[in-house]
Amino acid sequence: MSFKKKTVDIFEAINLAMQPSDENFSILLSYFFVWFKPIWLKNAMKEWTNPREVLQNYVSGTYSILTKKILQLWWEPWLNDFLSDANKVYNYLAKDTELKKMLDTVEGKKYLNYAVKEIYEWAYEIASS
């Protein structure tokens, strides 16, 4: 039964991802930043983890084909606009109070700017290929 539920969730996510709209954008972001949690951020800031490497490992094989298609569909106007502005990414992530506390530090701001730049470049390379 739980396998069926997971399968349905995956297909629902893919279906929404293939229908770019303002309404679906927040849902897409929740999948895009699923790995960006307080425990991950704490370690990433300490070790200066490159999020590009995390994303490349996260979307490999079959997922890379799907990721490319989704990034291409969503690049204009949504992802390009969102990922080119660290403040928009901050506002999205800061909805989580734990993340907000971490991002509001000097180290957190530096890391967020670095991470957003890396994520933007990674997404742009895939979307434009």
Image (cartoon, helix red, strand yellow):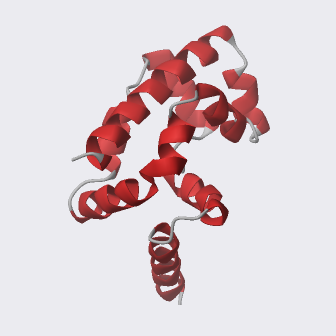
Residue, far top: 106
The image quadrant that residue 21 belongs to is bottom right
Tell me the residue at 50%/46% (across/down): 79
Judging depth in this view, the residue of 57 and 18 nearest the camera is 18
Tell me the residue at 64%/56% (across/down): 26
Tell me the residue at 58%/26% (across/down): 42
- From this view, report whether residue 21 is shown above or below residue 41: below
Q: Can residue 88 be seen in this view?
A: yes
Q: In this view, does 105 lie to the left or right of 73?
A: right
Q: Is residue 33 visible?
A: no
Tell me the residue at 45%/82% (across/down): 7
Residue 83 percent coordinates (x, y): 51, 36
Q: Is residue 56 left or right of residue 15?
A: left
- From this view, report whether residue 73 is shown above or below residue 51: below
Residue 129 percent coordinates (x, y): 21, 47
The image quadrant that residue 110 belongs to is top right
Residue 59 percent coordinates (x, y): 31, 53
Residue 82 percent coordinates (x, y): 56, 40
Residue, far front: 77
Total numbered badges shown on the rendered structure: 0
